Amino acid sequence: MTEPGTPAGAVAERATAGFRGRYGAEPAGRWAAPGRANLIGEHTDYNDGFVLPFALPLRTVVAAAPQDGERWAVWSELADSPVEFGAAEADQPGGVTGWAGYVAGVVWALRAAGHRVPGGRLAIASDVPVGSGLSSSAAIEAATLAALVDLGGLDLTDDRRPRLAQRAENEYVGAPTGIMDQSAVIRCRAGHALFLDCRTESVEQIPFDLDAAGLAVLVIDSRAPHRHADGEYASRRKSCERAAELLGVTALRDVSPAELDAALDRLDDEEMRRRVRHVVTEDQRVLDTVALLRAGRIRDIGPLLTASHASMRDDFEITVPEIDTAVEAALAAGAYGARMTGGGFGGCVLALVDADAADPVAAAVTAAYAERGFPAPAHVTVLPTGGAHRLP
Ligand code: GLA
């Protein structure tokens, strides 16, 4: 990652140049989608709960043009070789694997929903780091979706797009994720965090004007290798669903903080009790964070962020030593609050800091890493930007 978040222009130019180089023609247009950070509300989305992500100034850009027939060609600056597929591969979940599976998954989901998807040539460039928990896959899905919808003149409003992109990821690629990432990269607005009710998919744009408050969010990429992240994610999800079943509720969202102790008493398994405690308390922390932001009290959300981290570390058990070290060092260096963001087992930490403290806090984290013998982390200072859109 570079500092402070690369402008859309450079990555868009790379996508255009890639398109020209690969296809020897001009693209019909360019569509951008951001990565996301989740301010708070982790592993609550698939429990029908609440999340509060915001869009990052790191983007994926798809340059695209239609082509005749049901064929799609995809080039990416991050891949060794381009990929081509037709309707047969697109209609078979898993028919295209690897990074191009996110593109094919979107074609599949659109076709499965009855849309007439135009054939196309696509070239992808991206500043969203892959495997860092900042939703690089959702960014590819959202930018591809925006491109195909516009090129085909399809009728698909923004509020219906996240579910479709999620289906691409769940059913075509085969990752059992929730609705947060796709919602964030499509529905976020600049200067705001997106308060999403994952049960109803209703959203509210919550003012999160860090700049005006003299604040910034420092995103620290732990560079910790993802350790069994897919299997651990799926097992956390299963455990939550099993707990809901045992408690006789549709989802853990239906257990209120006031009912938590009684609910925990009804569960025998100590590990499952910890998982439930995380989800129920995390939902409440999202609501408390939203209330503080509505009141313009951005600094005061710090302790909620830090409490969320402790809950992920101790109850949901999804952090790793590099991540905990980054959080502790950021707090010791004066961050108002810090927490891991995203699915866990590596990925990024975000720290809420005074804008002029971002560098010293980042330096303190780097020093703590050196002391522990971890490879140096990367970092970037971010302000909330907007979701997927066509570039002029
Ligand atoms: C990943 C998933 C999301 C969500 C988060 C954890 O990012 O894609 O759906 O579950 O983990 O909050």
Image (tube, grey):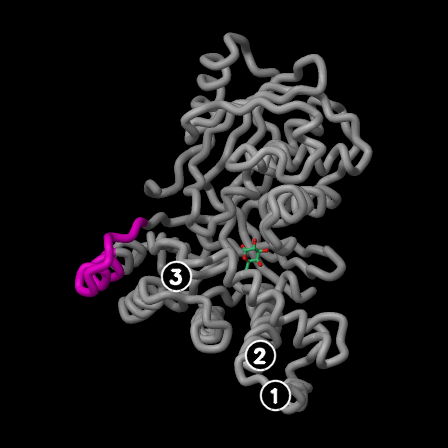
Label 2 within 8 A of ligand 1 by Cβ: no
Mark 3: C-beta under 8 Å from nearest atom of ligand 1 = no
Residue ID at (71%, 47%): 163
Image quadrant of ligand 1 equals bottom right
Query: Which secondary structure lies at badge 2?
Result: helix
Q: Residues within 10 Å of mark 3 (few under 14, many from 20)?
A: many
* Cβ atoms under marks 2 and 1 closer than 8 Å: yes
Front residue of 21 and 236:
236
- Whole-percent x, y for residue 1 in the image: 35, 42
Q: Earlier in the sequence, mark 3 or mark 1?
A: 1
**Magenta residues?**
363-378
Residue at 45% x, 33% y is 126
Q: Which amino acid does label 2 sit on?
A: Met
Q: Where is residue 198 in the image (x, y as percent from the top left)?
A: 69, 60
Residue 268's label in the rendered image is 1
Instruction: Please name the residue shown 37% across and 49% down the image.
Output: 381
Asked which quadrant contains residue 64, the reply is: top right
Does the magenta portion include 377? Answer: yes
Left/right placement of residue 168 relative to residue 123 reads right
What is the quadrant of residue 13 in the picture?
top left
Query: Image quadrant of residue 282?
Result: bottom right
Residue lying at the far top of the rendered structure: 24
Q: What residue does disc 3 label? A: 351
Q: Is there CB contact under 8 Å for labels 3 and 2? A: no
Q: Mark 2 points at which residue?
A: 272
Marks 3 and 2: which is nearer the front?
A: 2
